[in-house]
Image (cartoon, rainbow, N blue to C red):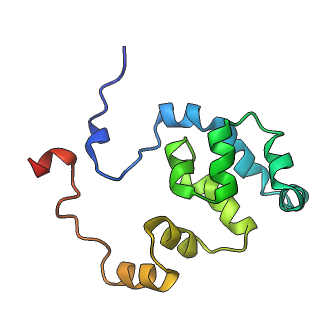
Amino acid sequence: MPLDKPYLDVPGTTIFDAEQSRKGYWLNQFCMSLMKADNRTRFKADERAYLDEWAMTEDQKQAVLARDLNRCIALGGNIYFLAKIGATDGKSFQQMAGSMTGMSEEEYRNMMIGGGRSIEGNRYVGERK
């Protein structure tokens, strides 16, 4: 019997729960492997070959190769693990977050300094009725 998940009603938000954790286990393990310099070197030398060492789905591998972090999250990735990919690429967390919102780093920074996005219309899907 599936658990009741009232938090699924938050628009544009993927909650990292037990189900997401199971789905993204190998993707997140791959990300954690990037904490070791030797693994980062191997990954950067031949990304596809390194990814093929992990029991990830093809969709997960393609999302990593495309650096589509939103897709990685949908496929079970946790942003704190995915940050290792950004660090391997020499990107700051702010640069990564900007790319995930379709903004430049500067636009993203200015939005956050200005208080972030408005919550109006973003609290839960049902409020739009």
Residue at the (66%, 66%) spot, across then down: 86
In front: 74, or 36?
Answer: 74
**Could one spot residue 28 in this view of the protein?**
no
Q: How many labels does the image show?
A: 0
> Residue 13 location, x and y as percent?
37, 51
Q: In this view, does 94 lie above or below 50?
A: below
Residue at the (64%, 43%) spot, across then down: 60
Residue that protrudes farthest toward the left in the picture: 129
Q: In this view, does 26 lie to the left or right of 125?
A: right
**Could one spot residue 45 in this view of the protein?**
yes
In front: 37, or 102?
Answer: 102
Q: In this view, does 111 lie to the left or right of 49?
A: left
Residue at the (29%, 51%) spot, across then down: 11
Q: In this view, does 52 lie above or below 102?
A: above
> Residue 34 location, x and y as percent?
78, 56
> Residue 121 location, x and y as percent?
18, 59
Q: In the figure, residue 85 lies in which quadrant?
A: bottom right
Which quadrant holds the N terminus? top left
Q: In the figure, residue 28 lies in which quadrant?
A: top right
Residue at the (51%, 36%) spot, across then down: 20
Residue that protrudes farthest toward the top in the picture: 1
> Residue 65 location, x and y as percent?
70, 55
